[in-house]
Amino acid sequence: MIRRYRLGSGRAYPVSLPVVVTEPLVRVQGLEKSYRRGRRIVSALSGVDLIVPRGELLLVMGPSGGGKSTLLNLIGGLDSPDGGTIRVAGCDVTGESGRGLDRYRRDHIGFVFQFFNLIPTLDARDNVALALLARATPWRESRRKAEELLESLGLGERLGHTPAEMSGGEQQRVAIARAIAGDPVLLLADEPTGDVDAVTTASIMEMLVGLNRSRGLTIVAVTHDPALIEYAHRVVTLRDGRLEG
Ligand code: ADP
C-alpha cells in the first residue's frame, strides 16, 4: 500500500515523496506497567496496544506522567513490563532477559535522549566510533566509519569537537548519528527536541525525517511539542497510561 503523507516544513524532502508502509515492525499487545511509590502502586501503562508499521515516523504525545517514556523504555528493552507482549522485527522482546535483551538493544535499537548523553571528554567522531566499537568493530575502522557517517550527515566540520564546543542542535545531531551507527531497525527518541529552540527543533526533525525517508528507518518519538506533529506520519496520545487515537 502506498500512502502519501503531508510533510509541513520538512523543506528538504518533497511533499510528494511516497512512503511504502509494509508489515508491522513493532507489535505491542496488552502492555501493563506499574511502579511502587511508597505504599502506593502507580499505574504507568494500562492495556496498551500499538502497531508501528515499518517505515513509519510515529509521535507519541500526551501530558506529563501519561506513560510516554515508560512505553519507549519498554519497547527499547530498557525495562520490563508487568504484563503484555512486545515484538519488534520478529523478536519477542518480553521473552528476553539479560544478555538476550542486551543483544536486542545492540542489534535492533537506536536511542536518542533529550539531553544528548554524549561523552563530554570525547569529540564527535569518537562518540560515534564508540558505538561501533561496542559492536565489535576495531577502533581504527570504527573511527573511519564514524567520520564517514558524520560527513554524510553534514557534520564533517565538527568531527574533532567535543560536546562543549558544539551547539545543542549539533550535539543532538551527533547523538542521532551515534544512535544509527549500528544500523538499527528502530530509532526511539525521548523528547529529542526538548532542550533546544524552535530553529534547532526544525533542523533536528529534518534530520530525522531525512533518515526516515532515505533509509526507511522506523522512528518512534515521544514529545509534548505540537511543533513536531507536522513531521510525523501519525500521532498517538497517551493519557493516564492509556492510548488514545
Ligand atoms: P511521561 O513520559 O508521559 O511523562 P512516564 O512514563 O515518565 O510519563 O511516567 C508515567 C507514570 O509512571 C508517572 O506517574 C510516573 O511518575 C511513574 N513512573 C515512571 N517511572 C517511574 C519510576 N521509575 N518509579 C516510580 N514511578 C515511575
Image (tube, grey):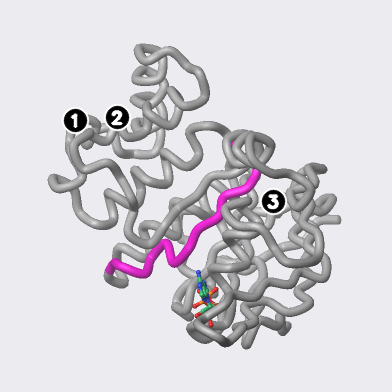
The answer to whether 171 appears left or right of 1 in the picture is: left
Mark 3 touches mark 1? (CB < 8 Å) = no
Residue flagged by tag 1: what amino acid is it?
Gly
* Marks 3, 1: nearer the viewer: 1
Label 2 crowd (10 A; few <14 / some 14-19 / many >=20): many
Q: Residue at x 62, y 46 (%)?
A: 217
The magenta span reads 184-196
- Residue 171 lies in the magenta-colored region: no
Task: Work out whether mark 3 precedes mark 1 in sequence or the reverse, and give the earlier one.
Answer: 3
The quarter of the image holding the N terminus is bottom right
Instruction: Report helix, strand or loop for mark 2.
Output: helix
Mark 3 touches mark 2? (CB < 8 Å) = no
Q: Which residue is mark 3?
A: 55
The answer to whether 148 appears left or right of 181 in the picture is: left
Q: Which residue is mark 1?
A: 160
Using the image, determine if residue 125 lies above or below residue 13: above
Instruction: Report helix, strand or loop for mark 3.
Output: loop
Query: Distance from label 3 to label 1 (Cα)?
Result: 33 Å
The answer to whether 126 appears left or right of 219 in the picture is: left
Residue flagged by tag 2: what amino acid is it?
Arg
